[in-house]
Image (tube, grey):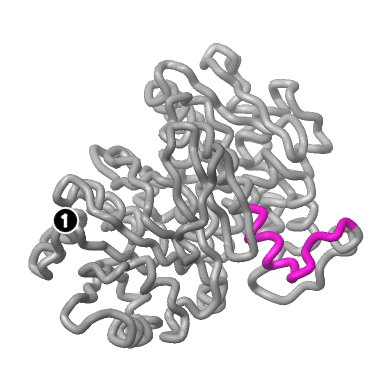
């Protein structure tokens, strides 16, 4: 069974059907790429369930699009009476402890025991909620993620964090609880709206900017990827990459980069993390906007602001800065939001991150395409630097509208 691929030494191993990770602390898990995951002929999901009782959770949108197929799959593959499907309210504003308690209550009523499995079929919010519920239900039960969004497949689906928003703070409460399985079917992406695709591209651009100049160049040449077809760029073909298509290359590369960056520091004992690029100013933007700004959009504005700040601090030359901010815009993502991009709120975001990261800032900024460094202390950002970066983005946004 695919789930049994072993990784003897710490690291990330790739194969035709996905990735296996083993962290230095011994934690290991599998991320699979498969086609037609809900087709009864595909045994993968059922094999991961291992004959256990299953409580599945979906959002209303996923239930409308895939609920029938999910129930047909479970009926065909699992024992009668061993599974149930429950519809949860969707949206970031439902990512609360109340929703976690609802999941636990539904699981209990469905007879889920300590050997049971919680199955999340949906995007990042659903998987975060179900993952956190699984972490605390009977002091921890297995859960499986079937990731249906681009953000879910390249970000939430490859990590071990779960959580909810609380106390006026995004993801304030949570747990590290690796999924027993994380299944990703690119076919789900065909039913996503343009905004959802763009939000996922924000997370992909994050990894390209800080880790991989070739992935960055691919996004420059294919800015509407996953929305319309593109031939594989010639420079990839000449390097023997992208042989299964440019979408496969972008998806696999971004997933593998994320897992490689997470692996040595899976439970964040070191709070200086490159994958926090786009996640310093962004959480405050989302909360202040009452989640009008989607996660991928906040990541985009954060990346643009951090990039302009790197230029102001002399860590990034103007041409590279322009190239990065231009890519974010070309992907259809915002680089500025006047309602939340105020010096006062962004300074508050810096202070909040400094407090959360053990009284060190660890702000990730690019120092070139495919490379990044840390600005470690609040004092490293002189007076006026943040305001200058915001003004540059404000002017850019105004010119774009004009």
Query: In which quarter of the view is residue 144 placed?
Result: bottom left
Residue 139 lies, in percent from the top left, at 17, 45
Q: Is residue 50 above or below residue 309?
A: below
Name the residue: 73% across, 76% down: 229
Residue placed most toward the observer, 77 or 65: 77
Name the residue: 46% across, 36% down: 266
Quadrant assignment for the C terminus: bottom right
Name the residue: 59% across, 30% down: 364
Which segment is the magenta one?
239-254
Looking at the image, residue 365 sits to the left or right of residue 319; the answer is: left
Residue 250 lies, in percent from the top left, at 68, 60
Name the residue: 58% across, 45% down: 12
Looking at the image, residue 46 sits to the left or right of residue 13; the answer is: left
Please identify the residue farthest to the top as the structure is shown: 379
Can residue 236 be seen in the rendering of this structure? yes
Q: Is residue 92 above or below residue 165?
A: below
Indicate whether residue 248 is drawn in magenta: yes
Residue placed most toward the observer, 212 or 125: 212
Q: Is residue 31 above or below residue 77?
A: above
Indicate whether residue 292 is drawn in magenta: no
Looking at the image, residue 193 sits to the left or right of residue 354; the answer is: right
Can residue 336 be seen in the rendering of this structure? no
Q: Is residue 186 above or below residue 108?
A: below
Residue placed most toward the observer, 346 or 154: 154
Residue 397 lies, in percent from the top left, at 65, 49
Q: Which residue is mark 1?
A: 114
Residue placed most toward the observer, 39 or 370: 39
């Amino acid at each position: 069974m695919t789930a049994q691929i072993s990784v003897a030494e710490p690291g990330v191993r790739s194969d035709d059907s996905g990735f296996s990770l083993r962290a230095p602390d011994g934690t290991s898990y599998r991320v699979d790429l498969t086609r037609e995951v809900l087709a009864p002929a595909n045994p993968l999901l059922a094999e991961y369930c291992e004959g256990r009782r299953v409580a599945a959770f979906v959002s209303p949108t996923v239930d409308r699009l895939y609920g029938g197929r999910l129930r047909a799959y479970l009926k065909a593959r699992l024992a009668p009476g061993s599974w149930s499907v429950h519809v949860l309210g969707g949206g970031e504003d439902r990512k609360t402890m109340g929703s976690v308690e609802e999941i636990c209550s539904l699981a209990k009523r469905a007879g889920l025991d300590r050997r049971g499995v919680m199955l999340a079929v949906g995007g990042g919010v659903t998987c975060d909620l179900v993952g956190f519920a699984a972490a605390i239900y009977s002091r921890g039960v297995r859960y499986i993620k079937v990731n249906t969004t681009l953000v879910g497949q390249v970000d939430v689906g490859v990590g071990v964090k779960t959580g909810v928003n609380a106390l006026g703070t995004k993801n304030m409460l949570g747990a590290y609880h690796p999924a027993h399985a994380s299944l990703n079917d690119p076919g789900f992406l065909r039913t996503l709206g343009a905004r959802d695709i763009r939000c996922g591209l924000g997370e992909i651009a994050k990894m390209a900017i800080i880790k991989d100049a070739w992935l960055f160049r691919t996004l420059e040449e294919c800015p509407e990827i996953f929305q319309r077809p593109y031939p594989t760029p010639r420079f990839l073909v000449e390097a023997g990459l992208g042989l299964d298509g440019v979408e496969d290359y972008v998806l696999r590369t971004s997933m593998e980069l994320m897992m490689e960056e997470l692996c040595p520091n899976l439970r964040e004992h070191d709070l200086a993390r490159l994958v926090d690029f786009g996640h310093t100013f962004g959480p405050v933007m989302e909360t202040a906007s009452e989640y009008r700004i989607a996660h991928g959009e906040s990541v985009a504005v954060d990346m643009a602001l951090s990039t302009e700040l790197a230029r102001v601090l002399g860590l990034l030359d103007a041409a590279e800065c322009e190239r990065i901010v231009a890519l974010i815009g070309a992907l259809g993502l915002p680089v500025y939001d006047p309602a939340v991009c105020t010096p006062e709120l962004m300074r508050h975001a810096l202070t909040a991150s400094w407090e959360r990261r053990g009284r060190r800032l660890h702000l990730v900024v690019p120092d070139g395409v495919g490379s990044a460094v840390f600005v470690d202390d609040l004092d490293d950002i002189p007076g006026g630097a943040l305001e200058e970066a915001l003004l540059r983005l404000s002017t850019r946004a105004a010119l774009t509208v004009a």
